[in-house]
Amino acid sequence: MAGVFAPYRRILAHPGAKQFALAGLLSRFPISMFNLAVILLIEGTYGSWEMSGRVAAIGVIAWAAQSVPTARLVDRVGQRRAMWPLTAIVVLGAALTLTTALSQGPEPLLWLGVVLGSFQGPLGSLTRARWSHLLAGDDGRGDDDVHTAFSLEGVLDEVLFVLGPTVVTILATTVHPAASLILAIGGLLVGMTLLLAQTETEPPARGADGGAGLGLRVPAAVIAVGVLTAGVGATFGSLDITTVAFADESGYPALGGLIIGVISGGSFVGGLLYGARRWRTALWIRVVAIGVLFAAGFAIIAQMPTLALYTAVGFVAGGTIAPMLASADTVVQRVVSQAQLTEGMAWVRIGMGAGVAFGAWAAGRGIDAAGHSAGQEVTAWAAIAVATLALATAWWVRRDTLAARPRGGEQELPPEAHVDGPPLPPAL
């Protein structure tokens, strides 16, 4: 077990690493809490799963639409100059959503609130960009160290997804429907304050060296994993609302968030093991293999008739989540430059966001009509789509990730020189 943790101890020993990793964790509270908090807030105040899924879907679509522009802004002007105004917009949107829901105001005001609340910027990419900046070329171990760092970030994300849904559900069902949304925004404010104060590890703004953004020149492999993560997002979107509805129909409404947390606990374990290993298998093969395993796991969980079986299978299936997202980000990191990293990862988040929006809407509509079993069907088909997309896009992922590319003015080593880790810092 000591060998598993050794790579993580090594990267966290870098000056400032522990501090920005913790701050980034707090700032990402909305990632695991905002969507579910909105769903539970609206269901608790308006009494409609379909309405809650519809409003949440609109917010996720807005989040996906803002991903590339805000990521490009962060790359161009730097994290501090971009993220403070965006954080203020999020707080304004959350306040509007809360006041409208609590007064049972018109639904269009909820749409406006969640749209504003979705201007969160590239929260999941801020610390990953810092790791890439900090570790590139570190004592010849940059490749391996950034592979470990990105897996660590995936594990930290799963800490949020273990605790976030559980806490959100408990607060919404036992304290107040608004409490979980307030917690999510509070974490964002505290985390962002701490993160943006750490200027030593902030990547340089692209505007300082005149670098160009991706624009419409998005590599095929980035588009491929963006499409793939749309299927992953649809699985997540349907899984969240289906799990909560399943627990509610079973007479244990407070268990919904806990079950989501157990599934994320499986992802925590899977991500930890995935990041500690030095992989000799080609990245494109890993993407396909993990995609197939992800599909199998979540297609099976969707067939479970009881909460106990649903939870047990969910833990096992969850072991594929962090490796799936870490692999997708690694693909992006291999094919774009450091100056375009945040923007490149935003395309993956667009796919994820669009998928979550569709999955939440489809599952919510089905649940209102036929109960949680209809939501399980949506989850199963979304999971099957992940395997299909992984196989369909494998050619582009293979081609682009095996090709050498310039980085920081130097030519990347050929693929065969990187048999035991991602070639140059990879980027969930």
Image: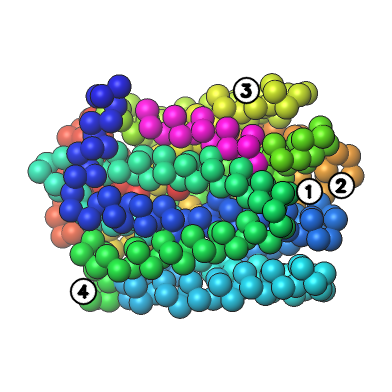
Q: Position of residue 128 (x, y in %)?
A: 34, 53
Marks 4 and 1 close (CB-CB < 8 Å): no
| Type of the residue with mark 4 | Asp
Report the residue at 27% width, 50% height from top. 18
From the viewer's perspective, is the residue at label 3 or at label 1 nearer? 3
Marks 1 and 2 close (CB-CB < 8 Å): yes
Q: Is residue 32 visible?
A: yes
Label 2 and label 4: CA atoms lie apart by 53 Å
Q: Which residue is mark 1?
A: 364
Label 4 and label 1: CA atoms lie apart by 47 Å
Residue 327 falls in which quadrant of the image?
Answer: top left
Label 1 and label 2: CA atoms lie apart by 6 Å
Circle 4 residues within 10 Å: few <14, some 14–19, many ≥20: few
Q: Earlier in the sequence, mark 2 or mark 4?
A: 4
Residue lying at the far left of the rendered structure: 139
Q: Position of residue 301 (x, y in %)?
A: 67, 27
Q: Which residue is mark 3?
A: 312
- Where 342 sits versus 401, above or below? below
For residue 13, which numbered disc appears in the image? none
For residue 209, which numbered disc appears in the image? 4
Badge 3 marks a residue whose secondary structure is helix
Circle 2 residues within 10 Å: few <14, some 14–19, many ≥20: some
| Type of the residue with mark 1 | Gly
Q: Earlier in the sequence, mark 3 or mark 2?
A: 3
Q: Which residue is mark 2?
A: 368
Q: Is residue 265 magenta?
A: yes
Label 3 and label 1: CA atoms lie apart by 24 Å
Magenta residues, start to end? 257-273
Q: Position of residue 190 (x, y in %)?
A: 43, 64
Q: Earlier in the sequence, mark 3 or mark 1?
A: 3
Badge 2 marks a residue whose secondary structure is helix
Q: Position of residue 231 (x, y in %)?
A: 60, 43
